[in-house]
Amino acid sequence: MRPQFEGSPRSSNRIRPKLDRHILAVGIFLITLAHSGGVTAGCSAGIDELLKLPFDQLVETEINVASKILTAADQQPAAVTVVNREQLQLSGARTLNEALMVYVPGFFMVEDQDDNIAAFRGLAADNNSKVMMLLNGHNLNAEWFWGPPDAILNSNNFDWIERIEVIRGPGSVTLGQGALLGVINIVTRKAEQLVSGCQQHQAHLLAGGGLNNMWQGGGEWAYNDQDYDAFVHINQSNYDGQALRREGWAADQAFLGYEGGVVADAGQRLKRTENLSLFSHLRYQQLSLDVLHIDQTRDLYNFYRDRNQFEQAITYVGLTHRWQVNPKMDLESKANIAVDDYTLHSIAGGLVTGGTQESRYGFQEVLRINDVWQGHKLALGAEFHLYDFGQTNAKGDNFLINVLSPENRANLDALKQSHTYVYPASVNVYSFFLENNYQIIPRFTLFGGLRYDKHQYWGGNLSPRAGAFVVPWDDGQFRLSYQEGFRGAVGIHYSGCCRHDGFLREDNFDQIEGTIPGFSNLPAIKPENIQSLELAFNQRIDAHWQFDNVLFYSITKNIIDVGGIFFPPGQPLPPIGTDVPGSNNNYWFFKNNTGSIEQLGFEASARYAIASFNATVSHAYVDILSASDQNLGSMYVGDTGEIRAVPPNVTRLNLVWKPLQKVSLGVNYLFYSDWFATNGQQADGGHLLNAAFIYNPWRRLELTFNIKNILGENNLYPMNNNVTGATSNGTPALEETTFWLKTKLELL
């Protein structure tokens, strides 16, 4: 009989002890809030301020992700979407990744065998390392493998976020390696957004609950005056998830852990997550400090081995200082430190099956000069990043095992020594960039940029940008731009990884021929590169209507894909240099595909806003014009040249309506078209409908009610998978219709 898995609604013993460790801290924090004082009656912001219309807010918002010198929404040199706090609240989304899919044209969340992929413009990579995540402009990406922190991208708590700025397409010209497919910049809440008028202090108690043992509890505190700004947020949340339906991948893929069966037998639950989030933003005059700690455990519900629950604890500290040298010149300095702690668990039995840690350090200087020559705005900058990976995590582990057989359980301590997860290594990256904006006449502006990155292993890379803004008539603007993005191979490609799991590092590429007859040596990997040409047109008709359109053409080269060497069980593979084959008698490795992929697409949206109603309808389309032979059947392209695992057409409708003074309603509809599965078949699309409303029954209380998947859509969801060569027709990753309620109480 299969043992009852830990963490289910019937038994959650593995998760609960970690919750207990934090209850005392949460209790002390809330008592502190209750006695903080300083909340002045009669000064609380009304719902009109809390639910400011996205259309109006976009016009006023300073955007800081695409340019080092331009912040106006209509002057961005790349396609940028801003998702604000109210939209996140009204999204009906379970995770941050899902919320971005609700609102951002050209963005789609794709399932993978051990990840949730943030896909941009039809390209879904093997992991998220080809997407960059920032926190208030600081790079959060890990170097060894994962890229953006999973504990944030797939977090079920985003109450500490004020807005998210998303670059649709490459952003490496200003941001460097990792900004290949897209960029996600998280702008956090600050006290100035909570404290207004005659207030200096404000405190809130947060609580919530929903189906499948969804609950949250926490609080936040804010203080603001002319010189100081302090915001503190703490939240503990849990969701036991839904049973994984026995369909598609979950029914067809064999579970290769000890218990056998198929994926649906292994005990994973859909979207099961436990999350602890602590965030603080502190400012004194022009100096600001961000401190973030998130500890999240979630089920890898598509995975087929015994390491099927993933925990990430990220601790981050970022410091920013801006010095106004004179009215035309300022110097911005940024420094940050992050520690990423990773642990893998087995759901059946709750044992630790792996773990590792990465520490990283970053420093950036940006000098901005306005009117250095008449009409010119100039930015010059330099960056340094240091990554130390392959460290032992908080449990003292740096190992990985796939199967918890009785023999492995009995020898777990020995396996921790022999099954190294990530080999220790350090990587440093030096970067220099410049950006210029030249307004020749009021209706014609040229812009450009150039960045040079020097990587310890793969060498140097130049990323250019060039373009122009043309304003042919009032309230209408064209943008024509060319820019590039890039991403080198992740750190494990150079350090080595996953001993006895079959990973082959680059240092051993030249020893394949002499070891395995019939197989050729592999060349060193070059950075993957995307060249993007965009033609954008924005038109504001009147105070209510605005249209935004982007036509893009891109070429992706040196695509970093995954390859493998497989032998039948009766012909054991020999070691290749310092690497040994995996338990499935295989090797896997990263490689460049020859040739390129050409794409064409557009993203079009129309917004309408009046005092109590806001509507946005958008459509995103992308297609592959051509793909070289080696890219057929790759992670991006199907065997016959179609986009792989990403719907080519996605339509969105986002509505916000305030029918009463105390009530705001959000409705979000997303339709994605038929898509090509990894088994080569065309799979059915889907209709996703979420709704939410915010109700203020009295001034100090806010209730938010979310309903997800109102239509009960249950088609198999788009899924990409590469490493084992297995294919699927999709995964049952859509939650059944569900709901949850969140409350926010202003404390006296």
Image (cartoon, rainbow, N blue to C red):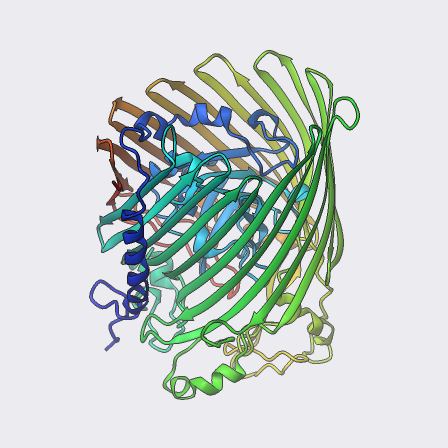
Total numbered circles: 0
Residue that protrudes farthest toward the right in the picture? 373
Left or right: where does residue 556 sit relative to residue 153?
Answer: right
Compared to 181, does 260 lie above or below? below
Of residue 206 and residue 289, the one placed in the foreground of this image is: 289
Measured as percent of width and height from the top left, residue 80 is found at 55, 34
Q: Residue at x 39, y 42 (%)?
A: 222
Toward which corner of the image does residue 440 lie, by quadrant? top right
Compared to 434, does 731 lie above or below? below
Of residue 507 and residue 263, the one placed in the foreground of this image is: 507
Compared to 730, does 747 lie above or below? above
Measured as percent of width and height from the top left, residue 438 is found at 74, 25
Of residue 285 and residue 483, the one placed in the foreground of this image is: 285
Measured as percent of width and height from the top left, residue 148 is found at 52, 53
Quadrant where the image shows the C terminus:
top left
Quadrant where the image shows the N terminus:
bottom left
Q: Residue at x 39, y 79 (%)?
A: 404
Left or right: where does residue 556 sit relative to residue 501?
Answer: right
